[in-house]
Amino acid sequence: MSIQERPVGAVIAPSAQRSDEVAKEETGDLWGVVAARARHHGEVRSGHHNTNLVVRLTDEEAAALGRPPGSRVVVRSRKAGTPRVVIRSWADERAVLDAIDGTLGPVPQCLARRGELAFHSYMEGRPLSDACPNGKPVDPPLVDAFAGLLADMARVPGAKLPPLPPYWPREGDSRGFLRTLLIQADEQIRKPNWTDFGGLFVALGVPEDALTSRCLWVPDLMSRPFSLLHGDVHRDNAIVTGMGDVPLFCVDWELATYGDPLYDLAVHLVRMAYPQSQWAEVIERWRIRMGGLRPEAVVGLDDDLQHYVDFEHAQSVYPDVIRAVSGLGTSFDRAELVAASQEIHRALRLAQSPLGLRDVLDPEAIAWLVHRWKVARGARLRGEEAGATVGWLCDAKVPLRDTFPGPAVEAALRAEGAAAARQVYKGTAHLATVVRVTGREPVMVRRKFGTATPLEPRFLEEHKVLRAIEESPAMVCAPRVLALGISDFEDRFTIHSYEGPPDDRRRPRHPVHGLLPCEVNSLVDQLAELTRVDVRPLAQRMGGLGFYEWLCGRLAGMVGKFSPASKALAARLGLPGEVELARRLAKHEVEDRRPVLLHGDLNPWNMVRQERGFGLTLIDWEMAMVGDPLHDLVRHIHLTPTTREVRERMTARWARMMPDDCTPDWERDFPVYQGLELVRSAYVDLDRMVTGCGLDAPNVRRAVGSYSTTLRKALDWLDLSPGSSTAANPYLVLALAPPVTVG
């Protein structure tokens, strides 16, 4: 906002006079009087992190405070209720201003500090954002002035600056500087806000270790001499004077730091919101101005700048999301919710590559998450009653239980929005939240979430499968379905019993490194118990085909639905298309065995180690099907690390525990299902590499990590040779493949 000047010696309203007297009594000096009047009559100057109020001193105040007659001062204070979302290298901005005074041209003076208040000298001019808002191109003379300002910071002697923290990298260690920025962003931005906002971030797909995991991949950077950096040069902090010699200068030095000058350029490029077409001009002006002053500071500019831009986008996702949801306040309309969701979507898209986020939710899904999160904290969408009950409709397919009635469902849905990060589990297609309803055991609220369509087909409805297990005599450890329904924003949910530790502060444990002997027994015994579940009500349609023939048809059909990019890469690697794949799979036959209920996806993360005893609970029944019981055993062994000894123990117990009509010729058919699983993985994992879908799931990361071996074995089983000399490295094929145009 532009600053409206008030005449010197303006009459103070009686209420303000009383405030002045109270302030003077409380503080014991005139600065309290100035602060009180600024709160009532000060003009606002733009600021991201602080409230900046400009007020003119009376002649008496100016004389008493040693300021020229007619002086104005800026009263700075942190914005009330604003979370800390910045990195600070120095706690005291005054020490930085004192160090650069007289060296760097016009800078504000810190005249006094009183608690959380700072009193700065007023600098004539107006913020660039008043005349040239974000997104608009900046005039070339001002671009050159910015480049000169950033370059001139190298003139400030390091010895004049305040002492740096003990963890600071050595002079010129640009790689260490970038790593320090990542660590400090995690320490100073993410961690302090994680208790309040962590659940929302996890639901948005930003994991707890998003920043720290990047530290392992910090690239080698060229060494550049360190210098003072402003750390926050954008349009609100740039004051345009209109004078030729000094066309602009910067205020708000609280984020100043000391390090690689290329970082200041990256921050400036991003936070100034230049149109993309102007980036090259800004970079070139900086190269000329900085190169003329300190040539060694522009070494590696073209190679290293993007790494700092990536960091800026990565760390900005935290303040951008926090500001967007906090800015909605306690009451907001749908237009404000949409705007906040679009801002969050923009921040996530920019951070997607730097943070390795595999999926970015669409704005509608983000709006639902933000609405849910705000309502859980007492806010409301205008037109809705504050504190009203959570709207939901019960699906008649799962009648409510006496043990978990409607009020319990409503309480669980309300608690879902307030869940902490440790309670939220975001999978490839589901958002699951552990909540505790007063007086009850924890439960799991599950929702299909995001825009990704599951690659592998689903054949049965999970709630029907779990109800069939519960109503059968089978001794199978599986979740119970407590409720099924539709909540606000027409979003479907399921509430399951929670099968993790009784203390929901601890995460469930999974046999990610393989099963213990007692767990082998537990799993095999439960596979045998599944044969006791009545599968007739599940009504899986197979068109009169045998299970193996039906399963091969589903696999070939899935390949036929691949994107052009996935099909092209499969062909380069030697994998056949839909028709040829079906022909080669049909060469094999298996014995008919009694159809039983199969879990369908017994990877380690779908098995939970029980806290009491030594058994396993089987979760996530979305891929359940009715078919050959041998398939569940083989697929588990394919998906889970197992030694030869464990495999032999497992298969021997399986053959002994299963009913006779479930085991005929199983040893002959075992290798057929092994080959089918290899082929399935070769196609599924290839598509995941192309699309990026689901790569954040640990079981998917493990599978993709061993893809070369999977591909080689799958081609051998299909009697095919690799189609490319780079088949041992499919990522290389993916990188070299020409772009595929989707019609």
Image (cartoon, rainbow, N blue to C red):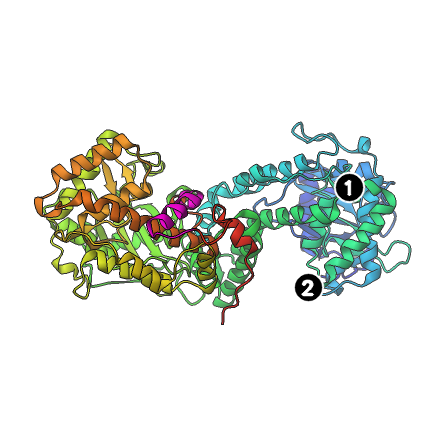
Magenta stretch secondary structure, dominant: helix
Left or right, residue 250 beside residue 167? right
Compared to 547, does 189 lie above or below? above
Residue at point 56%, 55% (across, down) = 736
Marker disc for residue 135: 2
Asked if residue 171 is among those painted magenta in the image, a careful observer would answer no
The residue carrying mark 1 is 110
Q: In which image quadrant can residue 223 be found?
A: top right
Compared to 597, does 177 lie above or below? above
The furthest residue to the bottom = 743
Who is closer to the viewer here, 713 or 426? 713
Q: Secondary structure at mark 2?
A: loop
Q: Position of residue 399 (x, y in %)?
A: 18, 59
**CB-based contact (under 8 Å), mark 1 and mark 2:** no
Residue at point 17%, 39% (across, down) = 654
Q: Position of residue 680 (x, y in %)?
A: 34, 52
Instruction: Check disc 1 and give the amino acid type.
Output: Cys
First to last magenta residue range: 702-721
